[in-house]
């Protein structure tokens, strides 16, 4: 039951006073009894839940070599000027003790459950806490040491949860208006003034003491505390100072201008006070590690330091107003800092742009060549160059969108969603996007605007960067000013998070997770909902396929600089997520854990991986050459053709029903009925049919058939010019229905706007689903039509032929049944 496509993973829940501990503890709520709190999997034993969870992880993910232990403190405001960053417990007024006896309790940076002024975790319903308590210091040290003892690398990942109604995303912490001294002061207040010298490591009690006020709840205290705690644990492979604080990152100080200033080397820098604060924190963390003898080693992954922005802002912060609008590479100075060792970001980029119904534009343009240059002029007809017609759960389709598709070739401006009946007419309840995303009205990028296209990792890594903005001078949104401090190819890129919720259409919007208690929760674009559950449909298979696509793509498509620096640190791509609460207790014990109900829809991988080893992928289908069905010239026959679709039907208790098509184009059942077949030495029709049937091995091999009565193409429209496109997929129109042709026996004429093209004015690709390529693009609105002979790709529908002899050398064949083939 192993899954080989995960090399590193995040260990959550980030909370729980002793969830991560390898020592058994009991807890007592005020007025309650003392009860075990981290041995639910094996009650009464000494082996704790996290040890069982790690056993399950190693048994299931054989290639996972790194585990990031996620630890959460709490933020109580979205206003940076007043926001406090603090640890807390759900047992305030209660008690803890080791289950085996003795005295010990919860402690984090000198904060205990008896600390006067300790800020409690809210209980929105008056009973259940919005979050679990912060993990106790000694539990983190022991967890790190236990993971290292298993031969795994360990990262320590610092995380913020916002304790406000709706549990808003931490990126919402910000300050307005910025470009002001007040904004700089707000950031300074958020960061605080803690210094490395204010902390003392306590190796006996596995904690770190703080000489400042115990109620100094600031971000620097948070980060420096855990830098010292990592030293107590013997060091970590990766120390992540935080993530996705986009609102803070983008706050501009009082001296910010569009052009910025230049450093001593002439590189552009801008006044982003939180980014400067992160650089200072990285310097302090490095000083702590170095003083403890924990030197960094990139080759062996020891004591590295990162900060990880979100996927939408890792290239730059967008600003508008005061006569300018554009994007500024605000984090380049952080990435260039000597004590930031990798360029990290949380990668939840879309791997699909797939609608309900027929799948939308990607389903229509899969066969066309992929763009060969950037920017893409006509994203509505962007090809994907796939070998066969995809669905959303096609591995090659998902991989084609890792360095392609939305936020690479084009973008949408709308992120609004409405839970409504499917606007594409399937009668299902869906997360329907709004605005340009609903109509798939794709917007283009222009030359020099790669910073807006945040999937352009390869371009970003290989190039220097400048701010890209419009200042009203008539040149538009273009690169301006000197280059930043980033040196191309100088550091590898890692992903502190990536993953996929296990719901329908998860690859359209991988960051979305279903959590009714969170304002940032929801379901991906176009996901179908289960009306009875009031939740999106579960789809574990698609999420696992996306993990396979992501892992295998970057393993095969990496790049290395001349100095040996890899573009992507593939060993540091941390999947989200594995839970320290083992199966089956989590998620079954909903009486204990408030988030257990979200497990089936969320990014958790525990319990969702395949029960059997992943099969070896099937070899790609053959695209020819194919044999041709015997024509048996002069023989009388008749034909019956039956187009067939496949439709999923959902019947509801109300009597209503909903339907969804599985196929955009039908399969055709073809029945050829012969009056007789001759076996004499002159005609040998029987031998031709039988020999061909045996050569095709019954149903095994596909072959070409000129569909009787349907082969002729007369003025068949294959496309309309747009002044750019030169390639058009061959297709056939029957009434109002148009579908791609499997093959073409010949093309006798090509006309553009009614005028025939010379033989040298066009070419036709050979084999399956041919493409007509013109030597010059037709004018906008000019129809492109062809005359020719169509072919269907078929196979025998059965593995037997029934032939009956009714006279000497005369046989009756009731029918030959064929069915068309899609490759």
Image (tube, rainbow, N blue to C red):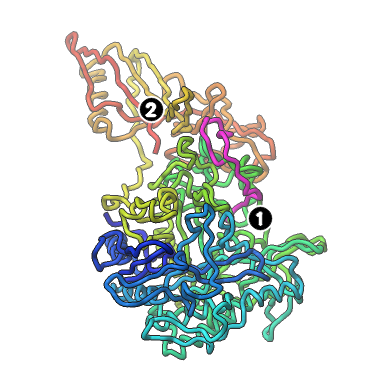
At a point 54% along the width and 54% down the height, the residue shown is 124
| Helix, strand or loop under label 1 | loop
Is 424 colored magenta in this rendering? yes
Q: Quadrant of the C terminus?
A: top left
Nearest the eye: 77 or 256: 77
Number of callouts = 2
Q: Which label belongs to residue 621? A: none
In the image, is 807 to the left or to the right of 761?
A: left
Residue 525: x, y in percent? 55, 45
Is 795 colored magenta in this rendering? no
At a point 48% along the width and 35% down the height, the residue shown is 531
Label 1–label 2 contact, CB within 8 A: no
What's drawn in magenta, residue-wise? 408-431
**Which residue is the extreme one toward the top?**
807
Q: State which quadrant residue 462 falls in.
A: bottom right
Q: Which residue is mark 1?
A: 445
């Amino acid at each position: 039951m192993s899954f080989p496509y995960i090399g590193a993973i995040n260990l959550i829940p980030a909370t729980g006073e002793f969830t991560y501990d390898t020592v058994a503890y009991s807890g007592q709520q005020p007025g309650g009894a003392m009860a075990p709190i981290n041995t639910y999997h094996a009650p009464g034993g000494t082996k704790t839940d996290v040890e069982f969870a790690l056993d399950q992880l190693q048994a299931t993910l054989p290639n996972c070599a790194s585990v990031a232990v996620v630890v959460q403190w709490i933020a109580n405001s979205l206003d940076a000027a007043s926001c406090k960053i603090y640890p807390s417990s759900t047992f305030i007024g209660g008690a803890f003790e080791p289950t085996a006896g003795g005295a010990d309790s919860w402690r984090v940076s000198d904060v205990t459950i008896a600390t006067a002024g300790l800020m409690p975790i809210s209980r929105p319903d008056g009973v259940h806490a919005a979050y679990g308590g912060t993990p106790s210091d000694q539990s983190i040290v022991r967890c790190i040491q236990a993971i290292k003892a298993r031969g795994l690398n360990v990262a320590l990942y610092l995380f913020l949860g916002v304790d406000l109604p709706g549990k808003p995303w931490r990126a919402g912490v910000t300050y307005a208006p910025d470009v002001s001294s007040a904004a700089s002061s707000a950031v300074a207040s958020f960061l605080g003034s803690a210094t490395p010298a204010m902390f003392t490591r306590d190796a006996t009690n596995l904690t770190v003491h703080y000489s400042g006020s115990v109620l100094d709840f600031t971000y620097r205290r948070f980060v420096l505390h855990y830098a010292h705690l990592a030293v107590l644990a013997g060091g970590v492979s990766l120390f992540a100072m935080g993530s996705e604080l986009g609102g803070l990152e983008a706050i501009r100080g009082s001296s910010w201008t569009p052009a910025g200033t230049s450093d001593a080397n002439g590189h552009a820098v801008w006044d982003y006070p939180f980014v400067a604060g992160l650089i200072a924190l990285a310097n302090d963390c490095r000083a702590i590690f170095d003083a403890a003898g924990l030197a960094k080693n990139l080759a062996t992954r020891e004591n590295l330091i990162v900060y990880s922005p979100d996927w939408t802002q890792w290239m730059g912060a967008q600003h508008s107003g005061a006569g300018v609008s554009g994007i500024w590479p605000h984090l380049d100075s952080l990435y260039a800092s000597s004590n930031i060792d990798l360029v990290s970001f949380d990668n939840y980029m879309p791997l699909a742009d797939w609608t309900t119904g027929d799948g939308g534009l990607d389903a229509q343009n899969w066969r066309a060549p992929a763009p060969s240059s950037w920017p893409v002029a006509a994203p509505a007809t962007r090809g994907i160059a796939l070998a066969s017609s995809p669905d959303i759960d096609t591995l090659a389709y998902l991989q084609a969108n890792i360095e392609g598709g939305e936020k690479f070739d084009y973008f949408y401006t709308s992120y609004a969603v409405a839970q409504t009946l499917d606007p594409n007419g399937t009668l299902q309840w869906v997360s329907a996007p709004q605005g340009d995303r609903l109509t798939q009205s794709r917007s283009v990028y222009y030359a020099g605007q790669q910073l807006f296209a945040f999937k352009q990792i390869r371009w970003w890594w290989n190039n220097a960067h400048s701010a890209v903005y419009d200042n009203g001078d008539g040149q538009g949104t273009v690169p301006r000013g000197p280059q930043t401090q980033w040196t191309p190819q100088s550091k590898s890129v890692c992903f502190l998070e990536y993953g996929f919720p296990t719901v329908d259409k998860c690859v359209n919007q991988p960051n979305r997770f279903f959590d009714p208690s969170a304002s940032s929760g929801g379901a991906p674009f176009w996901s179908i909902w289960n009306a009875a559950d009031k939740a999106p449909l579960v789809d574990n298979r698609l999420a696992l396929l996306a993990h396979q696509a992501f892992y295998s793509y970057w393993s095969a498509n990496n790049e290395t600089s001349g100095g040996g620096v890899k573009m992507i640190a593939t060993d540091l791509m941390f999947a989200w997520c594995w839970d320290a609460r083992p199966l089956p207790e989590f998620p079954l014990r909903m009486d204990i854990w408030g988030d257990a109900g979200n497990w089936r829809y969320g990014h958790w991988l525990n319990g969702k991986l395949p029960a059997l080893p992943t099969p070896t992928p099937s070899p790609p289908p053959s695209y020819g050459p194919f044999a041709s069905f015997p024509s048996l010239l002069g023989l009388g026959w008749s034909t019956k053709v039956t187009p067939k679709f496949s439709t999923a039907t959902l019947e509801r208790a109300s009597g209503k029903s909903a339907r969804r098509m599985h196929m955009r184009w039908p399969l055709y059942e073809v029945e050829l009925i012969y009056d007789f077949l001759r076996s004499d030495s002159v005609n040998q029709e029987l031998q031709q049919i039988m020999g061909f049937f045996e050569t095709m091995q019954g149903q095994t091999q596909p072959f070409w058939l000129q569909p009787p009565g349907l082969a002729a193409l007369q003025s068949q429209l294959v496309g309309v010019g747009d002044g750019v496109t030169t390639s058009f997929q061959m297709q056939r129109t029957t009434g109002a229905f148009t579908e791609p042709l499997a093959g073409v026996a010949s093309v006798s004429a090509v006309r553009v706007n009614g005028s025939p093209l010379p033989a040298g004015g066009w070419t036709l690709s050979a084999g399956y689903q041919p493409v007509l390529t013109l030597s010059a693009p037709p004018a906008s609105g000019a129809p492109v039509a062809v005359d020719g002979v169509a072919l269907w790709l078929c196979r025998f529908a059965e593995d037997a032929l029934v032939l009956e002899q009714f006279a000497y050398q005369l046989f009756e064949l009731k029918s030959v049944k064929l069915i068309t083939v899609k490759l």
